[in-house]
Amino acid sequence: MNDFIAHNRQAWDERVRRRDRYIDTATEADFRNPLGVVDPCGWLGGEVAGKRLLCLAAGGGRHSVLFATAGAKVTVVDLSPKMLELDRRVAAERKLSIQVVETSMDNLSAFAEASFDIVIQPVSTCYVGDIGAVYREVARVIAPGGIYISQHKQPVNLQADVVPSSRGYLLNEPYYRTGLLPPAVEGSWHRESGTVEFLHRWDQLLGGLCRSGFVIEDVAEPRHANPQAEPGSFAHRSCYVPPYIKLKARRQSERVQPVEKKIWKPG
């Protein structure tokens, strides 16, 4: 196991113990409109009953149980056993049937090819160095024509300062970088303190998805901006630094053969 995967497993286990940010199981209100909560863009057409659905890197007792309530045949994958305990607990309380698998998002060897009709992945690819490996695994386990909905941290979100200067939110991390990002600011809503993260460029986020056999059908940027919010807060920073991008992609019937990438140079 890569050291950063083991580190993030421990970090998320600890975040569950502390009931830290983003450790929120589904609420009673969520269960009144489960599909509306987990598919706010309506990309799944309002119906998932009977669909084989993978909640990827999505432990925490929210996505899995809401999709199961909407009638999907749900499997949830996460590297954190503590996060998966939340799924088991809420599913048991609601008498829902879900499958729980502990593994990293870039290792789906527990599943055969074309095992799922839908793959849902909330923000999580920032925790792996090679996003292409995640895309290739998803392409393998999703059926032709299947839908892959994923949300990611935008590159600039991981480049910009958390606290504004007199000139605004300055970029202090290079775009073309390798290796881990510096540790997150403790208590920040922009990154998850205690975890290790990687910045993925647009050609990796979008191009990598296409090269793995998907066609991007729609794009959304979840809005969190509030110009009246306190400077340095998540809502205020989101006015200037877009935090996330959400992608709807469909698996093509045949895998696209990779093409040689050409680097554009001016002049």
Image: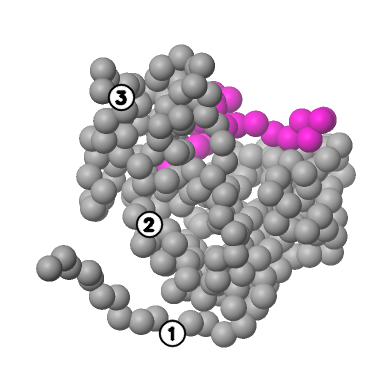
Location of mark 3 (residue): 168
> Considering the numbered disc 2 on the image, is that residue within a helix, a strand or a loop?
helix
**Looking at the image, residue 29 lies above or below residue 96:** above
Q: Earlier in the sequence, mark 1 or mark 2?
A: 2
User: Which of the two labelled residues, at mark 3 and mark 2, occupies the earlier sequence position?
Assistant: 3
Where are the magenta residues, as a range? Answer: 8-30
The residue mark sitting in front, 3 or 1, is 3
Residue 90 screen position, x and y as percent: 76, 38
- Which amino acid lies under the numbered mark 3 shown in the image of this protein? Gly
Kindly identify which numbered label has been placed on residue 202: 2
**Dividing the picture into quarters, in which one does residue 19 lie?**
top right
Q: Quadrant of the C terminus?
A: bottom left
Residue with the mark numbered 1: 257
Frontmost of labels 3 and 2 is 3
Q: Position of residue 23 (x, y in %)?
A: 60, 31
Q: Main secondary structure of the magenta part?
A: helix
Q: CA distance from mark 3 to mark 2?
A: 23 Å
| 10 Å crowding of disc 2: few (<14), some (14-19), many (20+) | few
